[in-house]
Amino acid sequence: MSLAHRLLETRRLRGKGEVLTGHHNANYVLRVGLLLALVIGVVPFTRFKYRVPLKTVEVVPRIWPREAEVLEVVCRYLREVPRCRAVLGELGDRSLHRYRRGEALSDRNPEGEIDEKLMREFAAFFVRTARVPVDELPPPPEDWPADGDSDGFLHWLVDFTEQRVHQPNRDRFGDLFDAVGIPPDAMTAFKERYHGLTSRPFKLLHTDVHRANVVVRRGRIAVIDWELAIYGDPLHDLATHVVRMGYGRAERERMVELWARAMAEADCGELTAGLREDIGTYLDFEYAQSVFPDVMRAALDLPADADEGHFRAAGGRVSRAVTRARRPLRLVAVPDMEQIVEALRKWHSLSAPAAAS
Ligand SMILES: Nc1ncnc2c1ncn2[C@@H]1O[C@H](COP(=O)(O)OP(=O)(O)O)[C@@H](O)[C@H]1O
Ligand SMILES: [Mg+2]
């Protein structure tokens, strides 16, 4: 273990300081002491985020396993994004990032409308991201669709959901999926229905621009958490943003409009080709794919001694996910809340001990 890693682990195990846990990592916020600062070459006593991955179910594609490699390129062009200062651990899966002062948007404005100024900030962010030269990015996987093949890109995402999320989890969650109205062929049938997208140039995408991944300071934003960045059709980034922010109808339309205008003004007008026809497809895909993680996470979050309140809360999450996926996945047998709660109880009684291991 390197000296820097050892010093960080000692700090982590001492358990002082804030721990921020997301879906994929535990993040330890700490000020680096003199020795550590010297070892990694940073200013002493500044704040950093030590990022340690959690064991979780795989639900979204990661085409670049090293976030640090992506950040190196991103930070050259988006100066506000906190840099990665060290990659640690035998597997290189731990890292130390600058901690940006400011407030997470999820704390400042956890739900509901955001102001127009912030929406313009997001539009400008998407422009900056689209302008990152793609030839500087790490190479995509071998089977990656060619630049501009929007259909191929969408279908790659659909195949990932089917082959890497849905199918491998059928053993453990199949009965639950069936019981909440998601038939085994839901995703393959989706793929057959959705094609004919306009060709748009592929760009760097963040794919997870939601409130918890945005740090606001003096009205300016910095988007953090680049682990899920990919290379592809920019409409996918806009769609995941719109859905995960929880925008209402009017805000959604405004955001799409601001995005399109900002792209056009930045001479990136070719990214808006077919926008009006195709944005719905990516929104539908987002609702469709998220039903799998949403159902699984609701079930997995049930404690071993779950009571009525836990089951109701989990039922609410499942019901919301299934309702949103209903049209895109053409779900014909969506059960009511009572039936969903019953399905969760059954899953819990049969599978929860395995979930805890
Ligand atoms: N540099 C930072 N400045 C302010 N808040 C941060 C910073 N880094 C992380 N956070 C907070 O910690 C949470 C988890 O960090 P994040 O990098 O998104 O990890 P995860 O991969 O677990 O989602 C964020 O949602 C945000 O609220
Ligand atoms: Mg995050």
Image (tube, helix red, strand yellow):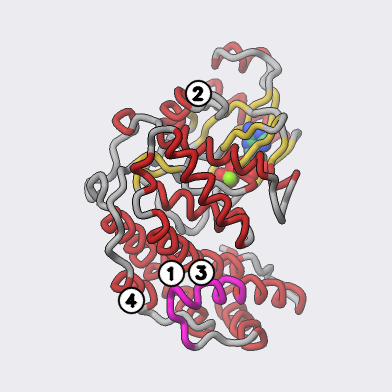
Quarter of the image for the C terminus: give it. bottom right
Position of residue 83 in the picture relative to residue 246 (left or right): left
Q: Earlier in the sequence, mark 3 or mark 2?
A: 2
Residue type at tag 4: Ala
Pick whichever, 1 or 232, lies toward us: 232
- Residue picked out by circle 2: 2
- Asked if residue 271 is among those painted magenta in the image, a careful observer would answer no
Q: Position of residue 192 (x, y in %)?
A: 29, 73
Residue type at tag 2: Ser
State the extent of the magenta-drawn residues as a range.
319-332
Secondary structure, mark 3, is: helix
Pick whichever, 327 or 47, lies toward us: 327
| CB of mark 3 near ligand 2 (< 8 Å) | no
Secondary structure, mark 2, is: loop
Frontmost of labels 3 and 2 is: 3
- Residue picked out by circle 1: 169
Residue at coordinates 32% horizontally, 33% vertically from top-left?
134
Image height check: is 331 above or below 273?
below
